[in-house]
């Protein structure tokens, strides 16, 4: 874990040049908040944004041949993959923290009450969205590299957009939303557990793919 943290710290150092992306996220969330969006919408928007943005580290890795640098810090391939997953997750965690703070500011300015279960539901759904997208993208990047996998990495986004316009899916989604609204705590917990499972298997697949790629 200690060696993996070296990769995580290195990734954060490398991504300093991408600070404008983080500013863009905050700007988008503020705009959505000013339009009166719910905490669920804000969290899911942040999850999509982070899933897209955090994978930029793979582009930088490929462009600057960082695999050689990773080898110089005496870490195994497994630790490189784990460090990358921790880096991406911390990006998501930081984004959610910022979103909740901004949401609370909006609530205080409007002098309305906020519901903790709503926040839990927003976080649970956003984590599921983030884990699903990142869980598909990252093994592809570890196996094919950023340039070759870039097009394939948009598949999860395209699938979600396609499902949203299908009548059958919309009907089923309405039932899920009704259950989620009636059982926010349980649904949020189920989303978090499912997300952790997705991340775990995604990590295992990424390790296998990265070993083959190397």
Image (cartoon, grey):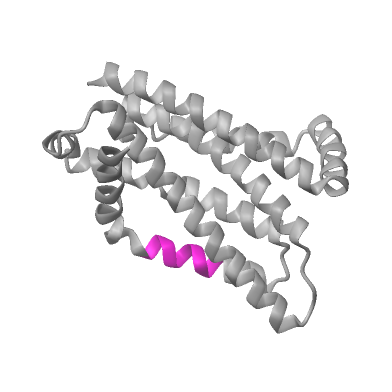
Q: Position of residue 43 (x, y in %)?
A: 62, 56
Nearer to us in this view, 11 or 185: 185
Q: Name the quarter where the N terminus is drawn.
A: top left
In this rendering, position of residue 204 left or right of residue 41: left
Q: Position of residue 100 (x, y in %)?
A: 61, 65
Q: Position of residue 41 (x, y in %)?
A: 69, 57
Image check: 118 left or right of 50? right
Q: Residue 20 lies in what quarter of the image?
A: bottom left
Magenta highlight on residue 156: no
Give residue 196's position: percent from left, percent from top. 56, 34
Q: How many labels sit on residues?
A: 0
Span highlighted in magenta in the image: 20-28
- Residue at 33% of width from left, 25% of height from top? 144
Q: Is residue 25 magenta?
A: yes
Quarter of the image with the C terminus is top left
Magenta stretch: helix, strand or loop mostly: helix
Residue ID at (83%, 30%): 168
In the figure, 13 relative to 4: above or below? below
What residue is rendered at 43% in x and 22% in y? 204
Most foreground residue, 2 or 102 = 2
Is 121 or 49 nearer to us in this picture? 121
Q: On screen, 53 above or below 155?
A: below
Q: Which residue is painted at 78% across and 64% down in the image?
A: 115
Left or right for 67, reference 115: left
């Amino acid at each position: 874990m200690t060696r993996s943290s070296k990769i995580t710290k290195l990734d954060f150092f490398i991504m300093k040049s991408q600070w404008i992306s983080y500013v863009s996220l905050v700007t988008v969330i503020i705009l959505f908040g000013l339009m009166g969006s719910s905490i669920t919408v804000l969290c899911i928007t942040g999850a999509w944004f982070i899933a897209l943005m955090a994978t930029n580290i793979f582009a930088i890795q490929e462009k600057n041949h960082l695999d050689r640098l990773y080898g110089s810090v005496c870490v195994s391939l497994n630790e490189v993959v784990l460090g990358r997953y921790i880096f991406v997750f911390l990006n998501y965690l930081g984004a959610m923290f910022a979103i909740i703070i901004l949401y609370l500011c909006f609530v205080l300015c409007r002098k309305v009450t906020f519901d903790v279960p709503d926040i839990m539901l927003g976080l649970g759904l956003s984590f599921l969205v983030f884990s699903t997208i990142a869980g598909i993208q990252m093994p592809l990047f570890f196996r094919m590299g950023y340039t070759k996998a870039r097009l394939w990495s948009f598949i999860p986004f395209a699938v979600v957009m396609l499902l949203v316009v299908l009548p059958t899916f919309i009907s089923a989604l309405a039932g899920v939303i009704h259950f989620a609204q009636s059982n926010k705590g349980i649904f949020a917990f189920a989303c978090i557990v499912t997300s952790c499972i997705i991340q775990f298997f995604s990590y295992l697949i990424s390790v296998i793919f990265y070993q083959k790629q190397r």
